[in-house]
Amino acid sequence: MDKQTYADMVKAASPPTAVFGNCVRAFFVGGGICVLGQVLHDAFLGTGLARDDAGLVTAAVLILLAVLLTALGVYEKIGKFAGAGSIVPITGFANSVAAPAIEHKKEGLVLGVGAKMFVIAGPVLIYGIMASVVVGLVYYFVGGGS
Amino acid sequence: MTFLWAFIIGGLICVIGQLLIDLTKFTPARILVAFVVAGCILGGLGLYDRLVDFAGAGAFVPLPGFGNLLARGVKQAVDERGFLGVLTGGLTAMAGGVTVAVVLGYLAALVSSPKAKGL
């Protein structure tokens, strides 16, 4: 039996309700994190911050919460329950920075914390920068139409 | 009303990620990369800001919102300083969020015992 046949058999045998349940949990947890972001954003706008600044402070608070929960081992549990609901929000990015940094601490501050911190965030930043350069080039040469 | 749309749109973006995990071979790392790039492209086309206007945090808290931030930043930088903006816009736009994540992640690593694991 080759790999593909096996994968097809696993797919056929696994209940579709599992996917549905995963999606429901991802929806509620991910949506809930966004609502928390909206509450924070509105609160910071209310203090007189400009829109972009309120966005940054909101992101900072969400990142702070995610790093705290990661250090306490709670974010991992949320992740097991919520799947993509905890990966896709900015809190998932914060977790992807903090968790490997903590996990690889024993390998030292440079090659442990320093290097492993970017094991997931690094690719995100690299492809993000690449995409921004492509967008910038197109915008420069073709124009944004505005 | 914004709260409801933030919940629904934010939740749906996460469902797309969950479907990619369950139905394809996408790992969490690939989801993060794909969503940031997708957000940057949609932002470059000027589409993602419409979603942000509509859904608020439901659009800017998920990672495509981070990509959109890069697109917005690079366009603004090109407007301000021409071609050099292509080189500076993306990183400038992400500077605040990435710095917060790095500083807090570093401090967390200093004070924590290495039992916490990633997703």
Image (cartoon, coloured by chain):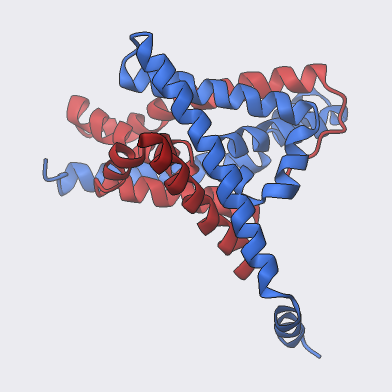
Q: Is residue B94 visible?
A: yes
Q: Nearer the viewer, residue A136 or A53?
A: A53
Q: Is residue B30 left or right of residue A40?
A: right
Q: Nearer the viewer, residue B54 or B74?
A: B54
Q: Colour of chain B?
A: red
Vertical comparison of B15 with A91: above or below: below
Residue A15 placement (x, y as % from top left): 72, 75
Vertical comparison of B35 with B6: above or below: below
Assign the C terminus of chain A to one quadrant of the image: top left
Q: Is residue B25 visible?
A: no
Residue A33 placement (x, y as % from top left): 55, 36
Q: Residue at x 21, y 25 (%)?
A: B81
Quarter of the image where one finds residue B46: top left
Assign the N terminus of chain A to one quadrant of the image: bottom right
Q: Residue at x 52, y 30 (%)?
A: A36
Quarter of the image where one finds residue B19: bottom right
Q: Is residue B10 left or right of residue A118?
A: left
Q: Nearer the viewer, residue A3 or A27?
A: A27
Q: Is residue B100 left or right of residue A55?
A: right
Furthest-bottom residue in this view: A1
Q: Is residue B118 left or right of residue A86?
A: right
Vertical comparison of B103 with B55: above or below: above
Q: Residue at x 22, y 32 (%)?
A: B78
Residue A109 placement (x, y as % from top left): 78, 23
Vertical comparison of A57 with B42: above or below: above
Furthest-left residue in this view: A146
Q: Nearer the viewer, residue A16 or B23?
A: A16
Q: Residue at x 77, y 33 (%)?
A: A74
Q: Colour of chain A?
A: blue
